[in-house]
Amino acid sequence: MIAEFGLAALWLAAALAALQLVAGALALTSRGAGLGAIVRPVAMVQGVLVAVSFAALVLLFAQTDLSVELVAANSHSMKPMIYKISGTWGNHEGSMLLWVMVMGLSGSFVAAVERRLPEPTMLATLAGQAFVSLGFYAFLLLSSNPFTRLSSPAIEGAGLNPLLQDPGLAFHPPPLYIGYVGLSVAFSFAIGALVTREVGPAFARAMRPWVLGAWIFLTLGIVAGSYWAYYELGWGGWWFWDPVENASLMPWLAATALLHSVSVLAARNALRAWTVMLGVVAFSMSMVGTFLVRSGILTSVHAFAVDPERGSFILGLLALNIGGALVLFGLRASSVTEGERFSATSREGALVFNNVMLSAILGIVLVGTLYPLLAESLGAKVSVGPPYFNPVGAIFAVPMLLVLAVGPLLRWRRDSLSRIKLQIAIPAVLLVGTLIWAASQSIGVLPALGLALSAALAVASLLPLRGRKLRQVKLPLWGMVTAHFGIAVALLGMASDAAFTTERLVAARPGDVVEVGPWQVKLQRIEPVAGPNWTALRGDLAVSYKGGAISELHPAARTFWAPANETNEAALKTRWNGQLYAVLGQQADGGRWQLRLWWKPFVPMIWYGGILIALGGLLALFGRLASDLKRLVARDKIAYRRARQGR
Amino acid sequence: MSEPKPASRWTLWLPLALFAGFVALVMVGLYRPADREVASAMIGKPLPEFALRAAAADRPGLSSADLADGKPRLLNIFASWCVPCAVEAPQLAALKDQGVEIAGVAIRDRPEDVAGFLARHGNPFSRIGADDRSIVQLGIGSSGVPETFVIDGQGTIRYQHIGEIRAEHLPLLRAKLKEAGL
């Protein structure tokens, strides 16, 4: 019954999305104006129904209902409960249902709370959201139905890939999806604004919390994914320019640009067409990323559900949604009147520069991700990696970070650098000083630039607080300062990982002592350990930092047997100033074992910085929501007073 | 710099044009997935010239001249760090026992690792060259490990097998070797 109930809820939700689209579109014409009243309630019910449908699927997985094909193919009755539940989205159909659920819920949330925009813009926005959702409903119902029953129930489920049975991995899709799909709201707002030609500060204020919220989730998702790759893959690297990583980075870059341009639009009514364009691009990048991953068109460690038929379906959806939005943009953007003017040296000028650089980096990542595909269609096989992404990205990242140090100190509209020359002198001195020091240390160009920029930015990011009473500083400003400081922190981690990492690869006998950086590592013994579905060889290492207290590390090489797979469990020892990273390799001859050791000074700063960046977003979001709420209350008070006076 | 004037009409269509290019590109990619199985463009072409130092102490190194001595053989691309390479070891051993000569190229490997690998999984190779920077690998159109090539007596590539050799692949490989003149 639950499966049928979930399927019925899904069909109903799809029908309501169709109604929402038609009613919203008709309500914009003079004849159908009466239909406008039903659009918001329909959007809310649609969100509830799709959530009910998703809950039904979770329940089926929790109960391990083996008469449902999806459950039988992806679950197992003996799995721990948390992996039963995470199994709901650990497959193609379930994750698409999660996608439409997030989309439906955000649409219903917008319908419920957003009252600042002119009603026609809201109707067009909700119709746009319904249009995009409808495509994904069709995809689910017609080609990826998660509720299909088996003609006779399976006796036992097929299980879940043991590598996915990791708490971090099991629960990373929902936040990432909230990030990806949250951007659909910005997309729909952009459509609504284009259709009704209402691009202005009110539009920007309505869109901003959505962009911020989605961006926070994306940031956290990327930070978590990077850390997972770092400790789980056992290569000691934290970013691999894998297509799936790029697929999450591209919407993030677009959302970061959007976040800044939307602020310009809200504060200064400038950058109108550009903000709308970014609103379209950000969610388009989410969809493109999903398509690239799901269609299996790019070879990636993440490729699952490789299926050309589904790929074609998603491609059709992409063409319809993105192509449609871009046609609308081409038709309407020229009539979006020019915004307020500003001079090059101004807050707006710096933000425009930031936007252009972020877009350039986005372009570079997109080209690098697609280039193997292009080359393959021309008959060559290539893979594009760090030698392309790092230096080419840096060409744009370095100027962007330089402007980032100065921009927040500038005033809106018009300013001059001479006004703030004393303030920027300190970071400038730090920048040059670090570069000179780095030159004497035989550090590579990029890491040296990273260290110098990090030092300069760490100071510069705090300067906007100078001369203010800290208690009176508004939350959005705290947010900006925190996020920008987080960039400096993350940059320190990245640059020092590249500049100062020491690596040792040794074949050690039990009893041998290896030195790596300031660490002494003693291999005590190798012992076999058995887990539920794996066996492992585990090394006992006694490590001490500069001859200090000894602690134990246990790197292991695990062998899974169903399905057969080998993984390396790296062991990490974190200090405030870096991380010791140990991997146990294969057995060498003569009773020796390969042991790979890294001392990575300040590497955890990469993720601490990422968390600070997300925290900055959170502070800004709270600040904005609080002031929105205040404004709403004030407006209600005025309306109330007027009503009383009128009486 | 002020905000650019309402951009000229055609620039507003530029994003759409770029997107159309993207769609065209992925459609090509989507409908030619078979490409991954089709063998390399190097089939029928001679091996590029190379000379690799020995990767293991007890076997000589490998040069392109060694592969054009009139005798057809297999060229196996492997690495000690590659798990599927260990999986195909019994099949290579079987081929060797049937009199097939197999030359090896170890990719980005260390002598001690290669020695350990051969000690664990057997050594079916007559010669093993060390390709430390994947130059030969890329030159013969291989993009991963393991891959196995059928080379005829003139040093021309006759067949490329991508991935590990499983028992079910053996008849095809033998047939290809026969075609190459073995």
Image (cartoon, grey):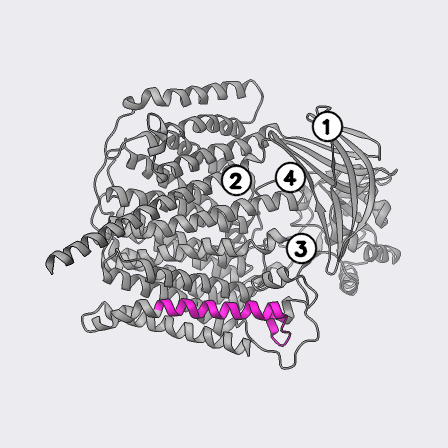
Q: A313 or A97: which is nearer to us?
A: A97
| CB contact under 8 Å: marks 1 and 3 | no
What span is in magenta?
A43-71
Of the numbered discs 4 and 2, the one sitting upstream in the chain is 4
Residue that label 1 marks? A549
Task: Return the mark for residue A236.
Answer: 4
Residue that label 3 marks? A163
Quadrant for residue A235, please give it. Answer: top right
Tell us which disc is closer to us: 2 or 1: 1
The amino acid marked with disc number 2 is Tyr
Q: How far apart are labels 2 and 1 at the CA level?
A: 43 Å
| Residue at the left extreme of this rendering | A646
Tell us which disc is closer to us: 4 or 2: 4
Structural crowding at the residue carrying mark 3, measured as other residues with C-alpha within 10 Å and reported as few (<14), some (14–19) or many (≥20):
some
* Residue A60 lies in the magenta-colored region: yes
- Residue occupying the point 68% across, 43% down: B136
Is A211 above or below relative to A32?
above
Residue that label 2 marks? A388
Of the numbered discs 2 and 3, the one sitting upstream in the chain is 3
Structural crowding at the residue carrying mark 2, measured as other residues with C-alpha within 10 Å and reported as few (<14), some (14–19) or many (≥20):
few
Is A72 above or below relative to B41?
below
Tell us which disc is closer to us: 1 or 4: 1
Query: What main secondary structure does the magenta stretch of the protein show?
Result: helix
Q: In what element is the residue under mark 1? A: loop
Image quadrant in which the C terminus of chain A is located: bottom left
Q: Position of residue A144 (x, y in %)?
A: 52, 70
Chain bearing tag 3 is: A
Q: In what element is the residue under mark 2? A: helix
Q: How far apart are labels 1 and 4 at the CA level?
A: 24 Å
